[in-house]
Amino acid sequence: MKRTAFIVALTLFSAAQPAASADTRIVKLCGPDHVNEAASTDDVRPNPDGYYVASLREQVSMGDPRILLTTSDDFYLCTRPAATPDMDSTKALLLMKERVVKYLFVPVIRRDTRRPS
């Protein structure tokens, strides 16, 4: 029993360490004053292929390098403008107000906070 308690305590301790590094990754990758761009708690929806970001109408598939695992309880979304400098002017003007996923921080352990119906 003591060995099991030790293993559980060690696991919790090691899980607490990446939480701090996840915060630094958000600052490093998204910018120091960045706020979470997920529109609501239901904005990012897991599905069999990966994750669907409803506010952007964008599917991010499993294995995509933009998905980063975090020990946080919530999804964290960073976006970038859809228009890029290498586009022609017509396409850039059309996509000027559009945003796409830059990074999606996904909780390692997803806790379902909704009550069963």
Image: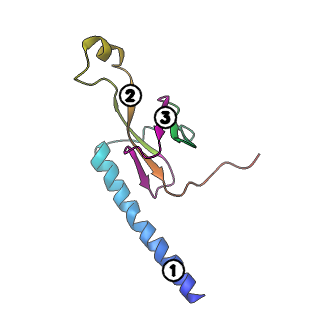
Residue 12 in percent (x, y) is at 49, 71
Residue shown at 49%/57% (left/top)?
108
Left or right, 81 with respect to 36, comes to left
Residue 15 in percent (x, y) is at 45, 67
Dot 2 alpha-carbon crowd within 10 angstroms: few under 14, some 14 to 19, many 20 or more:
some
Amino acid at pointer 1? Ile
Q: Which numbered marker is on residue 99?
A: 2
Residue shown at 53%/58% (left/top)?
109
Q: Is residue 84 above or below residue 72?
A: above
Dot 3 alpha-carbon crowd within 10 angstroms: few under 14, some 14 to 19, many 20 or more:
some
State which tag comes first along the sequence, 3 or 1.
Answer: 1
Q: Residues under labels 3 and 1: Cα distance?
A: 37 Å
Location of residue 34 by image quarter: top left
94 in the magenta segment: no
Relative depth, front residue between 61 and 24: 61
Q: Residues under labels 3 and 2: Cα distance?
A: 13 Å
Q: Which residue is mark 1?
A: 7
- Residue range highlighted in magenta: 56-75
Amino acid at pointer 3? Gln
Location of residue 84 by image quarter: top left
State which tag comes first along the sequence, 3 or 2.
Answer: 3
Q: Main secondary structure of the magenta part?
A: loop
Q: Which residue is mark 3?
A: 59
Q: Residues under labels 2 and 1: Cα distance?
A: 44 Å
Local secondary structure at mark 1? helix
Q: Which numbered marker is on residue 113?
A: none
Q: Residue furthest right?
A: 117
72 in the magenta segment: yes
Amino acid at pointer 2? Arg
Local secondary structure at mark 3? strand
Local secondary structure at mark 2? strand
Residue shown at 46%/77% (left/top)?
10
